[in-house]
Image (spheres, coloured by chain):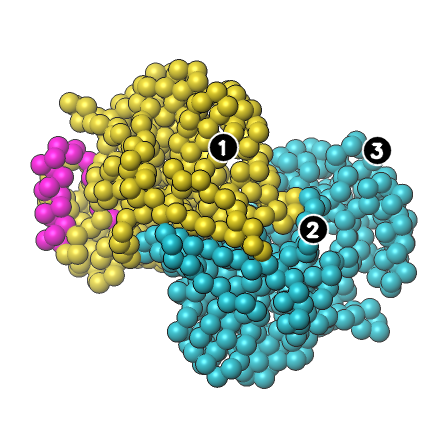
Chain colours: A yellow, B cyan
Amino acid sequence: MEIVSVDPFYLKMPEITHAADGTQDTFLVRIRTDDGVEGWGESDASPLVSMAAYCCPMSHGNIINIRESLIGESVDSADDVRRLHAKAIRNGLDIQQIHHAYAAADLALWDIVGKAQGVPVYRLLGDGQSHAKLPYASVLFGDTPAETRELGEGLRARGYRAAKFGWGPMGKVDEETDIALVAEARAGIGDAAQLMIDAGIVWGEDADTAYARASAFADYAPTWLEEPLYPNAMDAYASLTARKPPVPIAAGEGAGQYRQAEDIIVNGGVQFAQIDVGRIGGITPAYRVRQLCEERGVQYVNHTFKSHLSVAASLHVFATNAEFGLCEYPAAGSPLSEGLASHVERGADGMVCAPGAPGLGVTVDIDAVREFHAPVRMEVDGTALGFDAP
Amino acid sequence: MEIVSVDPFYLKMPEITHAADGTQDTFLVRIRTDDGVEGWGESDASPLVSMAAYCCPMSHGNIINIRESLIGESVDSADDVRRLHAKAIRNGLDIQQIHHAYAAADLALWDIVGKAQGVPVYRLLGDGQSHAKLPYASVLFGDTPAETRELGEGLRARGYRAAKFGWGPMGKVDEETDIALVAEARAGIGDAAQLMIDAGIVWGEDADTAYARASAFADYAPTWLEEPLYPNAMDAYASLTARKPPVPIAAGEGAGQYRQAEDIIVNGGVQFAQIDVGRIGGITPAYRVRQLCEERGVQYVNHTFKSHLSVAASLHVFATNAEFGLCEYPAAGSPLSEGLASHVERGADGMVCAPGAPGLGVTVDIDAVREFHAPVRMEVDGTALGFDAP
């Protein structure tokens, strides 16, 4: 099959707030082949900046845009998808945004090959059966400990057996509030559930405070403490994990390329590596991180705060490893993220599986794409760079 | 002083080729304050993608554009410049391009504070006298060894006592050609000069070939072998440098944030760290890398393949360290890069110094800006994001 079109779309909610809620807009890419197979992908990235990486004029041999790297190429196999990943990243060597931007294209290409071959993406990636994962509801802390408890109770009522609370007031008031937030999250979700805490990089490079909080939170038995420090504060992560805090440390969502994930695993010493396929450059590099986790005895878990297109893509990466048992599962999305694609539903047992249908295995709702589409126009020197409507 | 305008400009030559020549276009930023002080900066980055990072609509609290981070802020001191760097990078946590894009703004802010205080930027950065550096001419290999020799002879005739040859056919034909390129570069520039070889990441993750070439090239006594491997191939760099090749290894130009420079120094084990202020996010993080180099006994050297605005900015970073004695000095630029700003000229002794005039110490030629300006128009959902003309 030959790639005949690569169409990036900017979708957004009518109103955007400062909340750390990644479902307020999205960056979507549709790729079509000459025999009519269509694939879709989504990045967790700035839509406008990513779109520019699809159409920017060439600066020299190391700044070549993604459309130019893909249009006219052949895509028939998993090897082709990997080859095109390498080509686009090489052509965009000096485009810092390339990994964020290309992620959506990589998902779309895996979707295409899976659809053409009639198999789910996880089977293209390697051997093995798909294993169910325990989905954890991913929500922001309430504005107060009491509101956080209510959120937890609501998730429990919806049948969640695991939940992560993050950002919001954590780390911004005082130690007492931090602990109260965790205590009320635990009270709300119940003792039987797994509880994860996402500190939202709030302690910067301060490994001592991160260690102190991990120790204090241990009374509430969280599965992990996530991103207590800046993503790149590697010395601080190394210092924190070397002290073996009583709550395991998780990080990695900020990894915008394979090396950053490798760095936080090998040098940062985290016990859970949280990888966002929509930032690291797609399924292709995420699968390499899964393999690194297997080699090093680290738990791989997805980071996902977008639509179920991203949930499905994330699950394919680690579906065949039974020991990687958790899945971040957005539980409080916007009408955009909830409506964009068919859902990876929880089963009667509360578990989720990578879709078994061909490709990524979810269906994009073109009406939702059109409803939330924000048309973009870019011109350089009077020349329009050309984006089609969905 | 209050920041009242932040204007990004896309400048380009009429024709752009695939050559690894970063002077074919540029990304320029002008910042103005309420009392009329004007600063300029330049990134080594895709102009269009970087421009989007100045105007992209907010996605959430971690995707906020650079203009929004800066307009209305006060800037009176070096501490303000550092504070604004931290603010803009934090607001753009999930904009992968943020460091490339912000670099130009960081340069412009140092320029402003230096001009307002009447001192050169190196004096704002720390104590100490400015020391002259030996400029090395930075050119691409010729298409053949013979052409490379001619290039070397030309540089020698122009008085260069050091020259770097890079990219072109290196690593793309066979070992014999690679060695002939180095031999003829040496023959052209002469035995008295320092010679640097830039392999242009051509051996990927193949540390064995890189080691073999470093050994073969040692006969021609190069000062370093630069970027024999992919920027992120950290295991390969570690393996190569651990074998102590007879030619020192240099790398780092791809560092798009402080951690990447720290990674190639600490984990990659390079002996020369080549930092591009126009990619790493400006003078602010580059100065931190200089300090890390001082702590670890690694040589800091600039990477610069843009206008003399970037040459000046680069020199300020390490002017006050007498032991960091080399300066990459673009010697074959385009009319755009040559004409954009006044030059940091070589002295009668062939050396270059950080300009002593206030700020960055070079003058941008507004006529050149207008001549090469490529107007950009970006619209999202019918709303123009607004770029002024220069």
Give the labeled residue for mark 1: A5
Q: Amino acid at mark 2?
A: Glu
The chain holding disc 1 is: A
Between A143 and B98, the residue placed more toward the observer is B98
Within-10-Å neighbours for mark 2: few <14, some 14–19, many 20+: few
Classify mark 3: helix, strand or loop. helix
Cα separation, mark 2 vs mark 1, equals 26 Å
Q: Cβ–Cβ below 8 Å for labels 1 and 3?
A: no
Residue A4 appears in the picture as rendered: yes
Q: Nearer the viewer, residue B81 or A23?
A: A23
Amino acid carrying label 1: it is: Ser
Where is residue A285 drawn, in percent x and y?
47, 33
Q: Which residue is mark 2?
A: B15
Residue under label 3? B176
Residue at figure coordinates x 46%, y 46% from the top left? A51
On the question of residue B234 being in view, the answer is no
B201 sits left or right of A176 in the view: right
